[in-house]
Image (tube, rainbow, N blue to C red):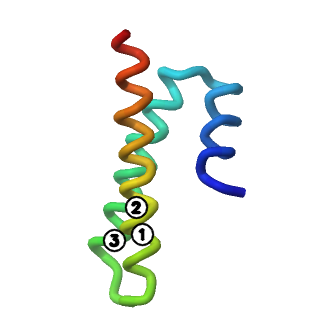
Amino acid sequence: MYNQEILQKIISKFGIEKSTQFCEIAALFYDIKYNACKNKDALNEFDYERDWWNDAYNNLNKQIEI
């Protein structure tokens, strides 16, 4: 399952405001994992996930502000 599908299910169940918080938390989670990672092979995944959830957070925040 891709992140976009996961996010849509989260929005459907919890609404945009809580989903925005989730995205912020998920981005922080992956940032922590990225910074603590000792396995260079995993760095790309953590970096991608952090950026994806951070972008989702920013996009949802824009929707809330409108």
| CB-based contact (under 8 Å), mark 3 and mark 2 | yes
Q: Nearer the viewer, residue 53 or 21?
A: 53
Q: Position of residue 45 (x, y in %)?
A: 46, 73
The amino acid at mark 1 is Phe
Front-most of residues 35 and 64: 64
Is the residue under label 3 in contact with that under label 1 (CB below 8 Å)?
Answer: yes
Residue that badge 2 annotates: 30
Image coords of residue 52 (percent x, y): 43, 52
Say whether disc 1 or disc 3 marks the residue closer to the N-terminus.
3
Residue 35, image quadrant: bottom left
According to the image, label 3 marks what residue? 34
Badge 3 marks a residue whose secondary structure is helix
User: Quadrant where the N terminus lies?
Assistant: bottom right
* Image vertical order of residue 8 relative to residue 31, above or below: above
Q: Secondary structure at mark 1?
A: helix
User: What is the number of the mark on residue 46?
Assistant: 1
**Residue sitting at 65 percent across and 35 percent down?**
8
